[in-house]
Image (cartoon, rainbow, N blue to C red):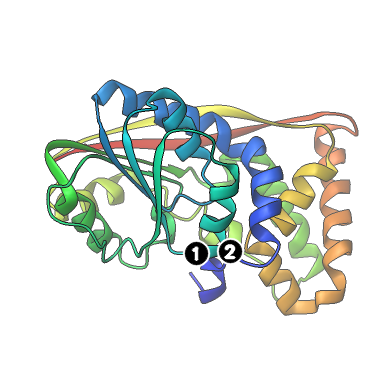
Amino acid sequence: MTNTDKVFAGSIPEFYDRLMVPLIFEPYADDLAARVVKTGARAILEIAAGTGVVTRAIAARLPTAQIIATDLNQPMLDFAKTRQRGGEVSWKQADALALPFGAQSFDAVVCQFGAMFFPDKVQAYKEARRVLKPGGHYLFNVWDEISANEFADVVTQTLATLFPNDPPRFLARTPHGYHDVDRIRGELKSAGFDNVTIDAVEARSKAPSPRDPAVAYCQGTPLRNEIEARDASRLEEAITRAAEALARWFGSGPVDGRIRAYVITAIR
């Protein structure tokens, strides 16, 4: 992972929430929120909350629960606040590797597609376990390999033809680079979690046109940073090429592709 993999700033939060959230994040947010409800949690910490799709889903189901939503990127939290309606939600910038909360403070810790960004995953898991009450649940998800996530795979392959000498690999390297379930189990065990369940969950990624996912990935994720680092003048060309490739694979009208992730439950 490079330093730019963790930078969600500028216009990225707006594109991320408007395009990426409905494209791939909403079904998994609903899944995580439903799992949180089943735990009976009343004090909930969210890590890597992003623009708040999981926060909103949990608050809608548990309007009286106390939710603290955190993220390393303040611009993402600032945007999330503007989208939140109702619920008992507090917002705080925080590093998952050094959570600013006391031991045994929460019934549940939730993290949607953030673990792959943790530079020290065992330390992040130790922190999650530290702030959980005995019997508390740590629920998070990670993407499966990029070949199991069709739009991301096509975009990555297409950009490799645009920049053949230095292909942008953000999507394969980071969001889709942490999918070895044996490794995940081992790192959770090293952090002190013995009771771990991992479920593979498939969903569908849908958009009104092939250009929508092209814009979403190229402007709503740190992939944009990689494209602009190679040649900022070619961002629109990258979007156009990606859209054309998606149209060849999925058609020129509404598009529908496979997405697949792992959902992990670890009990303290």
Residue 158 located left or right of residue 84: right
Q: Is residue 133 left or right of residue 261?
A: left
Q: Is residue 143 above or below residue 48?
A: above
Can you identify the residue that label 2 sits on? 8
Give the residue type that dot 2 points to.
Phe
Residue 160 lies left or right of residue 254; in this view the side is: left
Q: Classify 260 as above or below 116.
A: above
Residue occupying the point 54% across, 49% down: 81
Q: Position of residue 238 (x, y in %)?
A: 83, 61
Tell me where residue 134 appears, x and y as whole percent: 9, 39
Q: Is residue 233 visible?
A: yes
Cα gap from disc 2 to disc 1, whole angstroms? 7 Å
Q: Quadrant of residue 232?
A: bottom right
Can you give x and y, in whole percent of width and height, for residue 75 in the image? 56, 63
Relative to 136, is 203 above or below?
above
Secondary structure type for disc 1: loop
Image location (x, y in percent) of residue 101: 22, 58
Q: Which quadrant would the C terminus be assigned to in this image?
A: top left
Residue closer to the observer: 138 or 205: 138
Mark 2 or mark 1: whose residue is earlier in sequence? 2
Viewed as shown, does residue 191 lie left or right of 150?
A: left
Q: Are marks 2 and 1 in contact (CB under 8 Å)?
A: yes
- Residue type, numbered disc 1: Asn
Q: Secondary structure at mark 2?
A: loop
Q: Is residue 167 visible?
A: no
Query: Which circle marks residue 214 in the picture?
Result: none
**Which residue is most to the left?**
134
Q: Which mark is residue 73?
A: 1
Crowd around label 1: few <14 · some 14–19 · many ≥20 (10 Å) = many
Of the pair 77 and 165, the residue shown nearer to us: 77
